[in-house]
Image: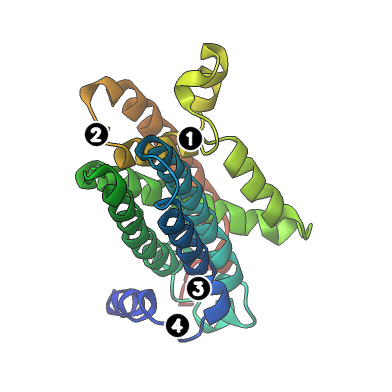
Amino acid sequence: MNDKISYLWRKTFTFKGRNVVKSLIPTFIYIFFAIILAVGLSFLSASQMTRMTYVVIGLTAAVWLYSSTILNYYEINRKDSIIKMNYIPIYLRVIPTIVFQTVIYLLFTIIYSAILSIKTTEFMLRIISLGYYVLLGMILIIPFTIFYIEFRQHFKYKYIDVILFILLILLTPVFYISENLPSVLENILVLNPFYYIVYGIELSAVKVSWSTNRIPNDILFLSEVTLIYMALYRLYTKSNIYMKKEKSH
């Protein structure tokens, strides 16, 4: 137990043993969008800035979820990684990268909202609601990351990472508003748990807090996550490579 706690503490906020450039690529993307929003202050109206911030926060939410998965894949599959740390279960090994990327994303989400407030004279971000959806996003991304790592062990197609990001963008409300979709299509997309996370974060950024009206969506999301974790447990118990080897008696 002490080894695991020490590992989490040591790995979460350090670049030792990581590819620094890859780890910081999401941060560079967030900085780029912060610059875009800052420039937009000069020639966009308050409503246009609000719309742009909505899109940026949704897009960077997709980047956050995507990078948490992909960076973990490359981290765990670097040379000798599994051999050197077979005493650390995979579900713990993915947490440091997820936590680090989450903290960076939260900081920039607050920055984006602060930039928007210069134009609207109102800080529209709902912090508690944002934290709620980000926490749910972390709960979701842990099993998804493990499934993706296992999937990539058997499927080596080099463009799969790009395809994953494109699907994430298309299946979440980044470039469209949920209410403007046909009801049938919206009901189908809502079944995607990533849609729920990204949409919730976007609403939090434009002064729409969580409310009891979203309880049915919460129940749907938690039911899906429960099934995902049950499937993960089944996979995990069958995958000896990521489990601590039992001592021979």
Q: In this rendering, would 156 be left or right of 217? A: right
Q: Secondary structure at mark 1?
A: helix
Can you identify the residue that label 1 sits on?
Answer: 195
Q: Secondary structure at mark 3?
A: helix
Can you identify the residue that label 3 sits on?
Answer: 24
Foreground residue, 201 or 87? 201
Q: In this rendering, would 108 be left or right of 245? A: left
Residue at the extreme front: 43
Mark 4 nearby-residue class (10 Å; few <14, some 14–19, many ≥20): few
Q: Earlier in the sequence, mark 2 or mark 1?
A: 1
Can you identify the residue that label 4 sits on?
Answer: 15
Q: In this rendering, would 219 be left or right of 178? A: left
Determine the CA span between mark 1 and mark 4: 31 Å
Determine the CA span between mark 3 and mark 2: 30 Å
Foreground residue, 155 or 203? 203
Question: The residue under label 3 is which amino acid type?
Answer: Leu
Mark 2 nearby-residue class (10 Å; few <14, some 14–19, many ≥20): some
Determine the CA span between mark 2 and mark 1: 17 Å
Picture residue at 50% right of the left edge, 73% below the top = 24
Can you identify the residue that label 2 sits on?
Answer: 209
Tell me the quarter of the picture where residue 124 sits.
Answer: top left
Mark 3 nearby-residue class (10 Å; few <14, some 14–19, many ≥20): some
Mark 1 nearby-residue class (10 Å; few <14, some 14–19, many ≥20): many
Foreground residue, 57 or 80? 57
Residue at the extreme bottom: 16
Q: Earlier in the sequence, mark 3 or mark 2?
A: 3
Q: Earlier in the sequence, mark 3 or mark 4?
A: 4
Q: Earlier in the sequence, mark 4 or mark 2?
A: 4
Is there a contact, CB below 8 Å, between mark 2 and mark 1?
no
Q: Secondary structure at mark 4?
A: loop
Tell me the quarter of the picture where residue 162 sits.
Answer: bottom right
Question: The residue under label 2 is which amino acid type?
Answer: Ser
